[in-house]
Image: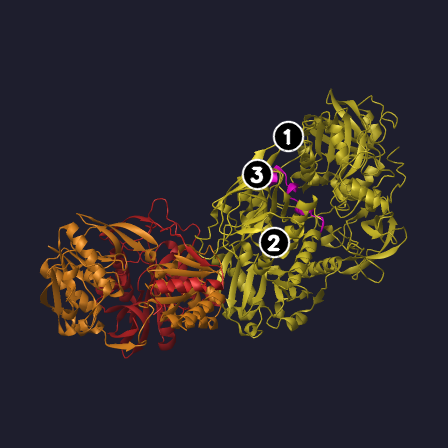
Amino acid sequence: MSEFPARANVVVIGAGIVGSCLVGHLARLGWTDLVLLDKGPLPNPGGSTGHASNFIFPVDHNKEMALLGEQSADQYRDLGLSVDSGGIEVARTEERMHELTRRMTSAKAWGIEAHLLTPAEVKDLVPFVNEDVILGGFHSPTVSVVDSLETGTRMRREAVDKAGCQVFASTEVQDILTVEGEGGVTRVSAVVTDKGTVQAEHVVIACGVWSNRIANMAGATIPLVPTVHQMADVGPIDILAETNNEIGYPIVRDMDTFCYERQSAGSMEVGSYGHRPILHHPDEIPSNEEAALSPTEMPFTPDDFDEQMEQAIELMDMLGDAEIKYAINGLLSLTPDGMPCLGETIEVRNLWSAAAVWVKEGPGMAQVVAEWMTYGYPRVIDAHGADIARFYDAERGDDHIWARAEESFNKTYGIVHPQEQWENRRNLEVGPYFARQEDLGAVFFQARTWERPQWFGSNADLVERYGIEERPVEWDNRWWSPITVGEHLNLRENCGLVDLSAFQVYELEGPGAVAYADHLAVNRIDVPVGRSVYTPWLTPDGGFHSDLTMMRMAEDRVRIVTGVFDGGRDEFWVRRHMPTDGSVAFSNITRQTTTLGLWGPNAPAVLAQLTDQDLSQDGSPYGSIIPAGLACGGREISAALFRISYVGDTGWEIYTDWDNGPVLWDALMAVGADLGIRPTGGGVYGTSGRLEKGYRLMGAELESEYNPLEAGLARPKVKAADFMGREAYLAARDRGDPEVRMCTLTVEDLTDGQGRRRFMQGGNEPILTLDGDRIVDSHGRASLVTSAGFGPSVGRYLLMSYLPLELAHPGTDLQVMYMNELYPVKVASTGAVFDPDDTRMKA
Amino acid sequence: MSLLVLCEHDRGVLAGASLEALTFGRDLAAAAGLACEAVVIGEGAETAAADLGAYGAATVHVASHAVLRDFGPLAWGETLAQIIRSTGAEAALACGTDRGNEVLAHVAALLDEPFVANCRQITPGGTWSMTRMQWGGSLLEDATLEAGIRLVTVAHHAVEATPADTPDAGTLVPFAADLADSAACTVVADRVVLTQGITLATSPVVVGGGRGVGSAEKFAALEELAAELGGVVGCSRAVTNNGWRPHSDQVGQTGTRIAPQIYIASGISGAIQHWVGAMASKNILAINTDSEANMVTKAGYAVIADLHEVIPAITEEIRRRRG
Amino acid sequence: MRILVCVKRVPAPGSRINITSDGQAVDAAHLGFTTSPHEECAVEEAVRIVEEHGGEVTVLTLGPAAAEEQLRYAASVGAHHFVLIPITDVDWDPQRTAAALGSAIAGLEATDGPFDLILFGNESADSGGFQVGVRVAHALGRPIVNGIKGIDLADGTASARREIDGGFEVYEVPMPAVLGVKEGINLPRYPTMKGRLASKKAEVATVTSDAPAGGQARVRLHRPVEQVSETVILGTGPEAASAVVDLLEELGVLS
């Protein structure tokens, strides 16, 4: 054994599937001077990898999880440590059968082979299934079973051979040291273990269920909680033993009981996500020495499993007489939003998280983190949903993590609607109008921690006024209301008041503020005071990191306004790249500022009643920010009027102090009453208004996999000043026309096979040729629906999607798949389908 | 006033464990101000009693009765209880073997006195204080004993048997036990010999295999090495549970406790249940791919490698040296 | 055939056992519980006997209310009746335990008739007192032999085998009898799923005891001082064979 080193470039803590693959990928990317530690023995250090069921179902509705699952499956295959067993998700309910058609759609989106089976066809593949309790199945022939421990061993060996990685088992981390450097940046400096202290440039926490505890040692957080997933191994069973294989029959997921049956040689592993949520604090996990089996194979609590047993016997009668040879409360990691925690921690520079990753996506996630460390951003896939910087403070505490994990555990095999809202941990952050909005019957959608009205019950009369119909299928109607169409049409006819308090607002101030702002942004920020700039921020590879608005508030002050979904990542990005010489100060003024959007043809007339300010396009031109006093509640409040529109009609984002919000709301509602003002929800702001205008949304249309040329957001010229991603951006421009372009499509006929009108949700539905083929570009990027919604003012159902250039022109006929049926679509525009010349906004 | 030490024998062959008990008992008796006396029971007792003076017994009570033709827990217990009563002994001690613990339990039941098993250390006094084994020795319990007659066993292997600095007389005193015929019903009725020669409990070399061996078939290499060394094969509980070896090969708390000159533990992680059965080994050589396995860190010697490569290599090397 | 098995609920620890801060018990915070291994085999043996000879198996335990889990486990592998003597202390000393079991058994026999066979584990995995079965047998006036690894019943006699070095002893014990059995007498079955589900319906009777404490008292538990020995690494591959054989020669085991 080699001597414990005094220093290393990278120390990776945790030698499960993630840490082991990570050192392998770092070695492949040319890193050297690596150290891998684990407190347990090798090859099974006692974490979740050691008891994983080791299967991969490649079809997932979530793009990141699906692509990384496939990536990972391929990495296992490349090592020859994978068997395609196939897998079947069986349905016991009509609702699940409907869900399986959605599975088929996602399979098509990712190009994965899949078939819907009748109960008899399920029985042909799995003869011991009781076909009487199922209605059908979803067969995925490329479901694979992998050897995760051996994969970890091989990847470690590769790191040892290629990069001289030093591996230390049974080495317990006692502390992670940090130092405060220039500009007050806290940076990781060393890892203290029971074998000695190693100084390190980079430290990666790949500690699975222990990750948050280890991160806490450095003052960082990795929001996850160890959660029990019960598993029992029952056997021996002759029909299984006769295969003479680790796995000879497809894995069966009994989706409606949240249970799976997976052959393991002569016995069957029955795993459950159906029992009550059982969460543990990391301190409750025993050490390798204290544990009867391993730390993450905790004592089985049979009472929790009984119901699952009954259900399993229902599906496979033979299980009833099989002996329970081994049963555990196995631990795995859950996060507050179900996505992994990858990337640099926001609290400590060069301290990375590679956590909340399961065996099924381990190698891919490890590659993401290795690329992130190498290139400053992942390349294999856009991983914004897994970026650990996405969490706000309120999402990082145990109260939140536990509550969300408890709520989500039983949804592991659940049918989760794309718009599904959380039940607990609501009202964490509300705008100053919250009480008024509740009085108006607002239905709130939570965006991370912020509550935003999606529509207002008080506007129900608009449904009748505009003659709007409910949608015939409950799924399409769920988390949606025809009121939202009424609010849209009213805004176009009169005006609407939109609560934008959830905007995340930051300011850069100091002599270097404008220069730094220009360093972040593609477009020029060094503009006259009072002007705003809508701009992408690019990754080093020239893809989208962000898409937001920056405002020159003063000579040395720039305001940044971004969406609530991206606030955490954007704030971290700003802080991460800030000059350390003190020339720029950062402040987050989100909770000091509130924003109301006032839009519609009557907006100027409404606002004019509160101010003498010239509100014409001369006095308050499009894109400008002007200060104004507004007469509210018998006094004048100061506000900034930002002439802009995300919905397609003229109006303003009105910024004022948080405490002024209520009186401003009341004043606008009062003076607007005769002009048809209505409180208007996110359904208009985020979907219908936006889609009619073809506005792109970060995280939907805009991802790091796409660049501004493809998104149609490139300006004619590139500014002279340097900025992040400039080189890659210039290279993309030099290549000429982009390969794909963002388009808006109209659905030509929404009628399904049963004669019902259906409405796509914007959940990665594939756009297909008239022959029904997937459309995939040379980078392997498929054309998928990024956003979908009804455009009331154009009377069409609208979809957005990237399309190859040859298809990206109005009039191209294509198809979209939704719930396993095809619908005709036509390319409408690469810009706006409503008021393409922006005459209404600039009126 | 005396402390009686029950010395086991099997048809005249004194058990080594009883010399441990005598070694422990003579010091305890001295500390308690008692005379140390031995008790030997049944057919062959006189032969077994020969050397007990050398280990510190002033007197050896040699008990006989027709029922005592072989070991019988009740008959032995009844006999010892009678000697305690007739000598007015204050305490009785045995080694914590199967028989020792069993006989003392009977004595305790007959005399309605407490009995403390498997002590490692005893401080006499008005109330005796002791440290005894729990969990097969992986935990210790400090306990107290309040009793009219103190009944204890000393844990096997807790002390090494050594002759007394000054041998005592070891005077044989016959004792005619008074036993009912019914006591015969738990006397050994028959014996069956399964193994001639070396057994797991007595072998000077044990080659042990654990889960890491991988299958029943793969124990062949261990058998070969054991045969070469004139030893036997042992195994862990995981192996027995997998059905790879019979339970009689199991080393551990609920299996056989071994004390060989060397225990070669291969592919054994060293769970507590196994360790307590192996810890009396004079030397341990662990063979394991994991340098941090419990067995490796507790062993005096280790080879960090795959047992499937190392074991045949050792066998080969022995054969080479022997020509 | 009526058989009674006495079992004890014990923690299932790993390679390091923690102790509660008051020193009175094993800290079971991370641990599951099981039936003490010898007794698990005793239950299996009893079930096998009634499977062969007919009859019923009653399982008795003295322990915390949670020991019901062990009774249900016995139910899941085929036992029929279940009795719990609940205690609130950490553990009862052997005399007290035996007194409580003895009077509970006498009570059960008074109601339902005598047991032909009573099985104990040779000793409990945790406190290891090596005496409860013997005391109970004396209280009931029945013969007992410990260390049993094989039982054959015929003509009112239990022929019991006890392992000794190199073979076994045979005891011919007239029934009703008590036997202390050891692990290895059988390989206990695991519960089937159906067995587990059925065990939930098993009824557990409760018998209380006011047995007085005996003369042995716990002061505290502690872990033995670990002998920290430096492990001599003889090699990291098959080439270590030479060093190993040197060692064997040195120890004199290469005759």
Q: Colour of chain B?
A: orange
Image disc number at residue A159: 2
In the image, are marks 2 and 1 on the same chain? yes
As displayed, is residue A597 above or below residue C90? Answer: above
- Determine the secondary structure under disc 1: helix
State the colouring used for the structure image: by chain
The answer for which chain carries disc 3 is A
Both marks 3 and 1 on one chain: yes
Q: Which of marks 2 and 1 is nearer the N terminus?
A: 2
User: Residues under labels 3 and 1: Cα distance?
Assistant: 16 Å
- Give how far apart the Cα atoms at labels 2 and 1 are: 35 Å
- Tag 1 residue: A183
Type of amino acid at the residue the image marks with label 1: Gly
Colour that chain A carries in the picture: yellow
Q: Quote the CA–CA distance across marks 3 and 2.
A: 23 Å
Dot 2 amino acid type: Ala
Is residue C83 located in the magenta-colored stretch of the structure?
Answer: no
- Where's residue A568, x and y in %? 67, 38
Q: Earlier in the sequence, mark 3 or mark 1?
A: 1
How packed is label 1: few (under 14 Cα within 10 Å), some, or many (20 or more)?
Answer: few
Q: Is residue C119 above or below residue A299?
A: below
- Three-letter amino acid code at disc 3? Ser
Does residue A390 show up magenta in the picture?
A: yes
Pinpoint residue A832: horizontal percent, then vertical percent: 86, 43
In the image, the segment drawn in magenta is A379-397
- Residue A189, disc: 3
Q: Which of marks 3 and 2 is nearer the N terminus?
A: 2
Q: Colour of chain C?
A: red
Locate residue B78, reporting x and y percent: 16, 66
Q: Which of marks 3 and 1 is in front?
A: 3
A446 vs A729, nearest the viewer:
A729
Point out the frontmost of discs 2 and 1: 2
